[in-house]
Amino acid sequence: MSMPDIEKYRADVADINLPQALKDEMIRVVWRMMQDEIDRAYGTSPVQQILHIKPEKRSKMDAEHARFLLQSMKDKRAKRAPECGGLR
């Protein structure tokens, strides 16, 4: 996932009475929220991918596979925003 060009959006938050670091974080948060919405719209969010597994297969998934899928989701989120600590 690409990160926003912070400079491009600073004018949009210029009138908000917060330190610049918090304004930059707001831009990143909104960017991530919109990216998540886009992922859901195209059916590519991690949750949708797991839910598309047929129910009979889901019930047969072993614990290790479930842990692998969860770690994959965490890794994907961490790559999206490493400077923010990724998944919280």
Image (tube, rainbow, N blue to C red):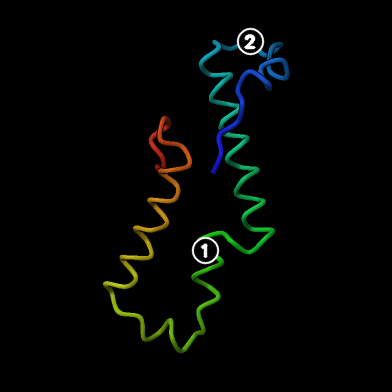
* Secondary structure category for the residue under label 1: helix
Upstream in sequence: badge 2 or badge 1: 2
* Quadrant in which the C terminus is drawn: top left
The amino acid at mark 2 is Asn
Report if the CB atoms under discs 2 and 1 are less than 8 Å apart: no
Front residue (pair 21, 42)? 42
Q: Residue 39: which numbered mark, if any?
A: none
Q: Identify the residue at horizontal 48%, vertical 42% (top origin).
A: 80
Residue 46 in the image: above or below residue 35: below
- Image location of residue 69, percent across then percent down: 38, 65
Q: Quadrant of the N terminus?
A: top right
Q: Would residue 77 be found to the left or right of residue 25 on screen?
A: left
With 85 as the anchor, is 22 left or right in this view?
right
Q: Residue at x 68, y 21 (%)?
A: 8
The quarter holding residue 35 reads top right
- Looking at the rendered structure, the kind of residue marked 1 is Val
Please indicate whether residue 81 sits to the left or right of residue 6 in the image: left
Mark number displayed over residue 47? 1
Give the residue at mark 2.
Answer: 17
Q: Is residue 50 above or below residue 77?
A: below
**Residue 65, position as x, y percentages in the image:** 32, 73
x then y, percent, for residue 7: 63, 18
How crowded is the residue under tag 1: few (<14 C-alpha within 10 Å), some, or many (20+)?
Answer: few
Crowdedness of circle 2 by 10 Å Cα count: few (<14), some, many (20+)?
few
Vertical comparison of 4 with 7: above or below? below
**Residue shown at the point (41%, 30%) measured from the top left:** 83
Q: CA distance from mark 2 to mark 1?
A: 36 Å
